[in-house]
Image (cartoon, rainbow, N blue to C red):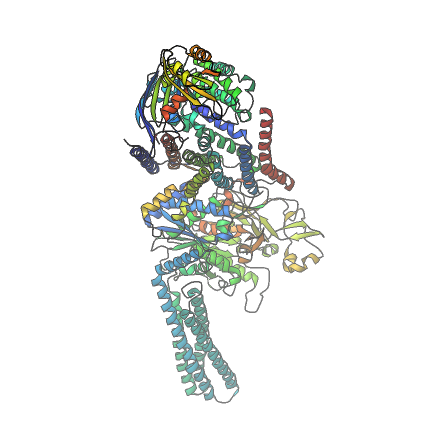
Amino acid sequence: MSSVWAIGRRELASMFRTPVGWVVIALFLLLTGAAFSVGLVPGQPASLRDFFAVSAWLLMPVAPAVSMRLFAEEHRTGAIEPLLTAPVSDAGAVAGKYLGAWLFLALMVAPTLLYPAVLWWVADPKPDLGQIGAGYVSLVLQGSLYLAIGTAVSAMTSSQTLAYLATLLPILGLLLVSRGASDSSLGGSGPMPEWARRTLQALSIPARASDFARGIIDTAHIAFFLVAALWCLFAAHAALDSRRWR
Amino acid sequence: MSAARRRMAGAGGAALLLALGLAAAAVVGAVGARYNVRLDVTSAGEQRLAPRTLAVLEQAAALGEVEILVAADAASLEPWARRAVRDVLELFEHSGRVRAGEIDVGSAEGQAAYGELLGRLIEREREGIDLHIAAVAAAAAQTEAAGAGLEQRVAPGLLALRDLLGEGEQSAAVRSGLEQWASLMRAASARLSEAARAARAALAEPDAALPIPPLERHEAALRQAVNERATELDALVEELEALGGSGVGSEGLRSGAESLGRAAAEIRDELARAADGIARLPRLDVLRIATALGASEIALVIGPPGTGVAGIDIGTLYEPDVVASDGTRITGDVRFQAEELLASAVSTVLTAAKPIVVLTHGESASILDSTEYFAGVGQRMARRGIDLAEWQALHEPEPPELRELDPDGARPRVYAVLAPDSSGAARSPDEAPGPERAAAVGRALQRLIDDRAAVLLSVIPSVLPSYGETDPVAAPLAALGVDVRTGVMLLRREASARAQELRTEFEVVPGGGGHAILGATSNLPTLLSYPVPIEWSGGSVASVTPLLTVEASADAWGETQWVRLWQTPREQRPLLPERPGPDEGVDDTEGPWTVGAAVERAGGIARTGRIVVVGSSGWFFDPVAARYQATDGRVALAWPGNAELFEAAVLWLAGQDELIAQSAGARSTPLVGPIEPGRLRALRWGLVAGLPLLTLGVGVAWRVVRG
Amino acid sequence: MILVREIRKTYGRVHAVRGISFAIEPGEVVGLLGPNGAGKSTTIRILTSYLTPDAGSVEIDGHDTRTDSLEARRRIGYLPESAPLYPEMTPGGYLDYRARLYGLPRPERRRAVGAAMDRCRITDVAGRRIGHLSKGYRQRVGLAAALLHDPPVLVLDEPSNGLDPSQIRETRSLVNELAARRTMVVSSHILPEVERLATRLLVIAAGQIRADGPMAELAGAAAGGGRYVAEVQGDTGEYLRLLRGIAGVRDVRAAPLNGSAWSRVTVETGPGAGDPRPAISGHAARIMLPLRELHEDKPSLEHLFLQLTEGTGTAPEEASPR
């Protein structure tokens, strides 16, 4: 276990050794800060729903940027060899890399806790903490899933660019898949069979995220994100292992 | 094993593992979805439905399928308000008891869906609509036949009679009378034909907005035309009979007059039948809310077949205006109020016996069809299935039976008694003088109170107390221990640029309270003109709850010598030499004053005999209650409290407390408090630029420290 | 210590390793020799558990790399070809990271890192970014990392790759020091390196072992005896006859040198023959043949190498994949 922590720690530190890590965080805070400020209008309802919506969309381009270098760069430089010949299991390597990326994402999102604090200070009566908490849970779950996808993709290629794009596409897919299935407005379900529609609906992230944004914590949603992330990490492990016998 | 095979085996094994993993994940996901726990973690319980709502929905589920559809132009709505309402709709949908959805009439599909919805509603009531159409067609035919009869038989008959007249002075009078009648009949015939023709044309060409003819309108027009002519014919028949029985003219003239009189009577009866045929038609919800439907923005609650349809105004749903604690006008808690409105609407749909408001007044002419006063009120009530009727107390001692509106006699009646202006002489020779009208209304009111009827009394300052007489409108309440001091009028002084101005309008914002009506009106600005204070003594006969209160202030007082002011037209008031002011000992300078109260009578059947007294007149008429103003580029009701008070009072008086929707201000949304612009700008910039700059700064420092 | 049994590995249609077997005892320093693409790197990677063989097995100190990989890996310190490191880290930081990977608890970690840095003489650059260090230093950092956990086995893949002669000398002396108490496998295609480091030689070509045995034996086996070269002027016929008469001489040949009266005379002796040089110069002096050059042509690894790998050369296939 200490080796998992060692790998994660190293990964996290390396993200801050170059300007890229800092710039990514600064940019994220800039955009979310703008989203929050726009909603800060005296007399209007005090809510972070817009902020959470923007943040969730921002995670989409940011998470792959964090995860793309996890394994791809090591493949390219050959540093994967010392890693895989150290007494660390493949699962441990995946876990360690993922941990490092996850901690980076957590450090990126953490400063935004300033916004609920500001809201608490300026709003009367006090804003709904439960809803805000649920919103953060949603952000963390989404980010975790995106990073897991990115880890798996990064383990399969040695090009960071390819890893970035190949991570972005599935995420975009999950975000847009609900357009294919029917909405909550009146409209027929079209030519799609019911099971297909249900599956697409189940894969849709925005539908689940909106529940969290409203202040509903549904264990089904939590299960979805966790199980999906775990499967992606499992795929990363398989990809890593495959290098040995290929 | 060859490498290729080995590799394929490896790849196949990995793929198999991944597929198994995916299957396992899918199973776990499905199980998780099936046996999920859904927690509402909001502190205000926003993602749950209130117990009252759940009870209403249970009731609905027992009766059949209720559908809720909100049709609005999404582009014109505030996004967060839209989201709040959608949350509520989804909660309703999730409960599994009703179907709830939105239609965006701003989009093409939305408009198509809306059209389809209208079609569906109309199909539901197809039978009734066809009945209406047939009845109107028949009535039109009858009217036309009557008109032809008048033109072809009665008018010439009258002229023939005239020709039979001999010479003489009496004859001259009768002659001119007959000629006048003939031309009147011709004119009447023309009007009847016109009305019939208009009705037929309308039936042939439906309204553009709705695929059905504007039946209500034409039914009313026909009925009015027919009734007027019938009244005229009545008079004619009387005259002809009188002529027949008088000694004037020859035998032939008199018998001719008699037979013509009978013919005219026949036509009159025909017209009466036509009017009756229309009057007996069942009232259809679809027709009631047709105008609102045509405007294509409405929130509809559609009950199971056999029940009705209720509507909610979109403006009220999405933009409830309330007064915040610091006196500013803000938008209230949309989410909470939406749930209230929708639950109430569902309740309404499921309640068969919707109240009838009987406007009880002392005017000589009918006021019900006056679009300038009651069009808005009427429409708002129509959406809840509440009808308006009229009792002209000056002419009728008994309250109307309202057979057509309420064939089974099951609908509760709420009598909105309007005190007349008792200050003046008659305004015209046909009219009764003020005191007489006040007496008529007073009698009606006494009768209602004795019968333990539901009364919504609106009073007006009265000169009678200043003569030492009791105001007949206020007297019936005195017996219940409620003193409506119509001799006093509240006035206030307002400092303006030029001088102190006298104001007779008061804006009151009710606070909260346990009473059902207060729950609906809290935080809603309400306008009252010429307010009259109400006092009561503690007693066991009745319990009184104040609904509207004017706060005590140095600039407000109850004036007793207001007649001069009352009689001066508004524009000339500033020129009055002696203006009323607070006089110690004479005027009532000690506030606060209750200007609206709910009275619950002890004994008797529960919820009967309720009375709501409002010390102002015209407060629920359109010019005040349906007056709109523009704020922040948005058009909203200037005084939403007035309409709300009326609706809540009607429902409370009808004993249907559960149908009263709580006001949006009853619970407050967390709002961003007031921040002065400079501070706000600094805060915004700090948030946008501060964190990123801080991050970069830390990064630079890190680099420097670590080397 | 190291047991390799019939390992095979194929990439696509290329057989990189075709049935290699050998055993290495504790304390041996083995040189793995072969042309580029012979399968050396692949074999090393199989040894270190980076790759799994298509067939066969490897045991490190009794632990099978297939079934007991983590334990096997723990016993190996590995310096891969071109020592890949993390350029943004410092040697101190990197070594600390590696120490954690090997599961060294905190107090031991600091000690091990310090010792390794001392050993490899990189303590003075411990705080600089690896990306700023020269190749020689980087190599030493890699070596230090391989030493951290004091493994019984050290595997070095092309340790002199890209180094200049002074750096090579440094590295070599270091490796020699290290070889004292450990089992070592050094893979190289540079013959002098292997010659100086190893006590035992494994020659691999075209995926198979061509020779396996102690250095001296193999080196001697190539030539199987001695070889001496002299350069004389004039007629060599008599001289050659005399030379043939020296005891132990197997073969004598003369070849004229271009454009002069001088000829090169090559004398090959059989195994066990003594040093014939005194006789060679003596005979030349006797018949008064001017002699200007006489030396022993030591049996070299190059011969062995070329012999064994004749016809195999650099394999037509790609170098082993990363």
Residue for point 41% across, 72% down: B200
Q: Residue furthest bottom?
A: B167
Q: Residue at x 48, y 89 (%)?
A: B166
The answer to whether C247 appears left or right of B455 in the picture is left
Residue drawn 44% across the image and 88% down it? B250
Instruction: Please give the count of numbered marks on the rendered protein.
Output: 0
- Pick the front one: B648 or A241: A241
Image spot of residue B655 (x, y percent) = 42, 49
| Residue B321 drawn at (x, y percent) | 54, 48
The image quadrant where one finds the N terminus of chain C is top left
Viewer-closest of C107 and C44: C44
Please determine whether, in this image, residue B256 is positioned above or below residue C42: below
- Above or below C25: residue B610: below
Whether residue C299 is visible here, answered yes or no, is no
Placement of C95 over or under C286, stated as above or below? below
Residue A170 in sight: yes
Instruction: Tell which residue pokes out farthest to the left in this image.
Output: B1
Quadrant where the image shows the C terminus of chain C: top left
Q: Position of residue B255 (x, y in %)?
A: 40, 84
Q: Position of residue B617 (x, y in %)?
A: 55, 55
Residue placed most toward the observer, B397 or B655: B655
**Which image quarter: residue B602?**
top left
* Viewer-proximal residue among B244 and A57: A57
